[in-house]
Image (cartoon, rainbow, N blue to C red):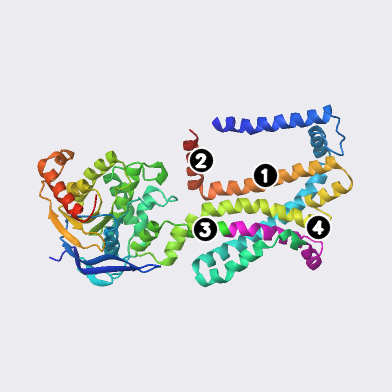
Amino acid sequence: MTDAIQVKGCQLIYPMKDGTIHALEDVTFSATEGEFLSIVGPSGCGKSTLIKLLAGLLPTTKGEARVEGELVRGPHKNVGIVFQNAVLLAWRTVLRNIMLQVEVRKGFDKQTYLGKAMELIKLAGLDGFQNRFPWELSGGMQQRVSFCRALIHDPPLLLMDEPFGALDAMTRDEMNVWLQRIWMEKTKTVLFVTHDISEAVFLSDRVMVLSARPGTVKEIIKVDLPRPRKLETTERIEFMQYITRIRKLMHEEGFY
Amino acid sequence: MSKFKDALYPLGAALGLLVIWQGSVYVFSIPDYLLPGPILVIGEIFSRWSFLLDHALVTLYETGVGFGAAILFAIPISVAVVWWKPVEKTVMPFMVFLQTIPKIAVAPLFIIWFGFGYFPKMLTSFLLAYFPIVIELITGLRDIEPEVLDLSKSMSAKPLQTFIKIRIPNSLPYMFNGLKLGALLALVGAVIGEFLGSSKGLGFLVIYANDRLDTTLLFADLVVLLLLGKLTFSVVEWVERYAISWHVVMREKEKIMFST
């Protein structure tokens, strides 16, 4: 079985007005089919860059990235992205925002996907909101719409760039539980960037810690906690131990 | 209900001002040729309404053509500027340069070139109106969050798809701001054109009444001009409400949220 994600010796150097930014250096890791892998690391360590690289939004300067065994050369069909902000179009209703993905991509029959969109809306607990506009929704609901948009074309890989970073703590907890449920139901491979260690441990099969810039893989920690995890799981001693361990690694990189 | 209440404030203030105006004219016995009272002005409008309407229609016609031309010019120019870098580099310096010339100063030249007909008025109207539309449209076509462009790119969108599905709808609220400003400036342009040489229109009537010290007619004319300005502005607002209701409703909701 091929790995869902394979990253080998990736380097990324951005050209800037005055000099360059060395964002990533020799990043190597892989994720198996259906795995939930989180990336944590100090701010500016290239977490988001890694996401963009796998989405085909940025080219590597060295090394290669493969998704579903295919070399990433540009934007591709195997991926759905969720950003920190919901990034919904203000002039489109919830349903039409979700449909944007299949409208833009080639080879999707809109009629069939209209039904799929409605199913996703139900799954996201947005039933009855399909004809509302984004500003009529709370932050958490908006983000759920953006998850639906990332899922509509049924990509094997979901890339998430701090999707709950803009939400308040309560909504965040709720969304974490929700995301775990969706992930267990849909069996997607997820690459999840966050700066919240507790969130990473709660959701992930493995947590990858990146070093300070230029970002490289410092350590990958397997999280051995039974699923489905509940909010009470966060009070367990093992959970705390994972957090302490990851925090220590971050501390070594000059974070905090 | 609250909308009706909101309207009461400016209406009340306007009524108050009118009362003070009429009162001052009466108390200080100001002669009509200096400052006619509102009652006299309103009387003038009613007694000479068909005369005023004839002139108003001329100005409305010039404004309409000037404004229409400004829209037809501004849309393709803005799209071209945003779509092709070379067009931007070629066109934008000219636009800014032209804009720095006071058009009122150039207007007499149009009389020499094009005579006393409608055309020079339409031209000044056009020249005043197009710039805000172009500037707003270009801003609207460009002002997209980087994340939205990333999203679009991640979906393998072609540049034309991004333009049609994202840039154009995004630009519409901006365009309507430009159109509101443009509509008012188009009217100003037409009136300025009429000042300089004409025998018809509300701008002509200002000069005509002024020459005869017919201040009452002058005020009546100004009121009609004001109504005409309000009319053109409202037409744009009305079209906006239908064309981009998603934005208008959102804007109004935000206003309520911030005011409470």
The residue wearing badge 2 is B252
From the viewer's perspective, is A181 left or right of A153? left
The residue wearing badge 3 is B139
Residue B95 vertical placement versus B140 (above, below): below
Q: Give the mark nearer the N terminus: 3 vs 4.
A: 3
Quick check: do tags 1 and 2 share a chain? yes
Q: Which residues are magenta?
A: B108-134
Between the C-alphas of marks 2 and 4, the distance is 42 Å
The residue wearing badge 1 is B230
Magenta part mainly helix, strand or loop?
helix
Residue B18 vertical placement versus A196 (above, below): above
Q: Secondary structure at mark 2?
A: helix
Quick check: do tags 2 and 4 share a chain? yes
Can residue A181 be seen?
Answer: no
- Residue sitting at x 51%, y 49%: B244
- Residue sitting at x 36%, y 45%: A130
Q: Position of residue B38 (x, y in %)?
A: 79, 34
Mark 3 chain? B
Decide: marks 1, 2 in contact (CB < 8 A)?
no
Q: Is residue A66 magenta?
A: no
Between the C-alphas of marks 1 and 4, the distance is 24 Å
